[in-house]
Image (cartoon, rainbow, N blue to C red):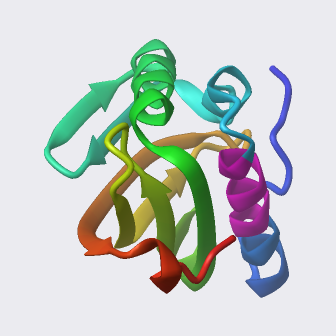
């Protein structure tokens, strides 16, 4: 199996690298490539949606970016230990009607020994904003 570096157990440097890699990947919106960072049996909670497996993640991300246009994300390391990382994030997007939103949230990540994310639990809140209020461009 190909390893996804850096591998757990994490220290501050490697946890920060993992967070930056996730931010960079998600900002590409390449759902096929992004899904490959998750284990084949990954388990997700994203708001009130529960996903199981890499294929469901890929489909979810494809649908996400068909509805969240001009997407821009910023992640920040919050905490780490062993094979887990906690992140705070915010992202901005507009919907198909042209309305802008900023989403705030927290994610808890758990990685397998090969560096693939096997669990991702995300709590997210959306705030309606005007286009001139955007911070992330």
Residue 39 on image: x %, y %:
57, 29
Which residue is nearer to you in this view: 3 or 52? Answer: 52
**Quadrant in the rendering for residue 130:** bottom left
Tell me: 19 left or right of 117. right
Residue 127 on image: x %, y %:
26, 74
Residue plotted at (36% across, 65% down): 101
Most common SS among magenta residues: helix
Taking the view exactly as shown, the residue that stands out farthest to the top is 55
Position above or below: 100 against 137: above
Residue 22 within the magenta-colored segment of the rendering: yes
Residue plotted at (74% across, 62% down): 18
Residue 20 on image: x %, y %:
77, 67
Q: Which residues are magenta?
A: 18-27
Quadrant of image for the N terminus:
top right
Number of disc labels: 0
Position above or below: 130 against 92: below
Residue 114 on image: x %, y %:
73, 39
Tell me: 75 left or right of 53. right
Q: Is residue 82 visible?
A: no
Quadrant of image for the C terminus:
bottom right
**Quadrant in the rendering for residue 28:** top right
């Amino acid at each position: 199996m190909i390893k996804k570096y850096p591998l757990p157990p994490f220290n501050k440097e490697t946890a920060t690298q993992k967070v930056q890699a996730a931010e960079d990947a998600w900002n590409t919106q390449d759902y096929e490539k992004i899904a490959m960072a998750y284990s084949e049996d990954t388990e997700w909670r994203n708001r009130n949606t529960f996903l199981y497996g890499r294929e469901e993640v890929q489909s979810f991300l494809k649908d996400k970016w068909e509805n969240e246009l001009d997407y821009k994300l910023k992640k920040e390391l919050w905490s780490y230990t062993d094979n887990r990382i906690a992140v705070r994030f915010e992202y901005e997007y507009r919907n198909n009607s042209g309305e802008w939103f900023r989403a705030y949230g927290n994610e808890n990540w758990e990685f397998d020994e090969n560096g693939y994310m096997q669990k991702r639990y995300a709590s997210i809140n959306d705030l309606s904003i005007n286009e001139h209020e955007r911070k992330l461009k």
